[in-house]
Amino acid sequence: MKRFLIAIACLAVVAGCDAGSPPPTPAISPGTSSAPREVNIIAKDWLFLPDRVDVVPGETILLHVINGGLDLHEAVIGATPVQDAWEVAEAATVGSPPGPTPLVSVPPDVAGLRIVVASGQRVDVVWTVPAAPVAGFVVGCHIPGHWAKGMVVPVHFVGPAPHG
Ligand SMILES: [Cu+2]
């Protein structure tokens, strides 16, 4: 009887290993303007959680950007020209007096969406995702030095959950 139980235990371990591949990401029910989908982005010193953000083209999202770090952080959402613009603009603030929000700006065509959040705070923003996927879309932080420390995660454009 004991030998039988050991055999069962080994089988369970083998089956567990076979099932070890990660489960598929659940399909997203896209948010609408009347019922935005809630998405959390957590900034820490110095990374974002989760390590990728999935969005459905054209959906409306209620973003909760939470700063769980001790430093000031931001979530800049946009493609490479947007990220580059903020990186350059904010690098110019090095050495300026501390404040809740760096007084910087970039041209409107490369502004993207920028949400600055103080340590321990949460900022909620309703955001409509571009109707068509955009290459190189990421969430980045350009408080000086943070991008270089790895504060960037990709935004993936994914299909919605199938209807019916
Ligand atoms: Cu940061």
Image: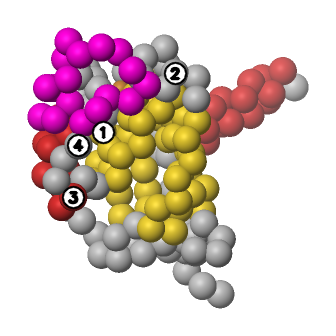
Nearer-N-terminus badge (3/2): 3
Q: Is residue 45 visible?
A: no
Residue assigned mark 4: 105
Give the residue displayed 14% in from the left and 26% down from the top: 92
Q: Answer with left or right where residue 48 lies relative to residue 29.
A: left
Check disc 2 and give the amino acid type. Ser
Q: CA distance from mark 2 to mark 1?
A: 17 Å
Q: CA distance from mark 4 to mark 2?
A: 21 Å
Check disc 3 and give the amino acid type. Pro
Helix, strand or loop for disc 1: strand
From the image, give the main secondary structure of the stretch colored magenta: loop
Q: Is residue 157 visible?
A: yes
Check disc 1 and give the amino acid type. Gly
Foreground mark, 3 or 1? 3
Ligand 1's quadrant: top left
Give the residue displayed 43% in from the left and 25% down from the top: 100
Cβ–Cβ below 8 Å for labels 3 and 2? no
Residue assigned mark 1: 140
Front-lying residue, 114 or 133: 114
- What is the span of residues highlighted in magenta in the rendered image? 88-104
Foreground mark, 2 or 1? 2
Q: CA distance from mark 3 to mark 4?
A: 9 Å
Cβ–Cβ below 8 Å for labels 4 and 1? no
Cβ–Cβ below 8 Å for labels 3 and 4? no
x then y, percent, for residue 26: 57, 60
Rendered position, 162 above or below 1: below
Nearer-N-terminus badge (2/1): 2
Foreground mark, 3 or 2? 3
Q: CA distance from mark 3 to mark 1?
A: 17 Å
Residue assigned mark 3: 108
Instruction: State which quadrant residue 68 falls in.
Output: top right
Residue assigned mark 2: 119
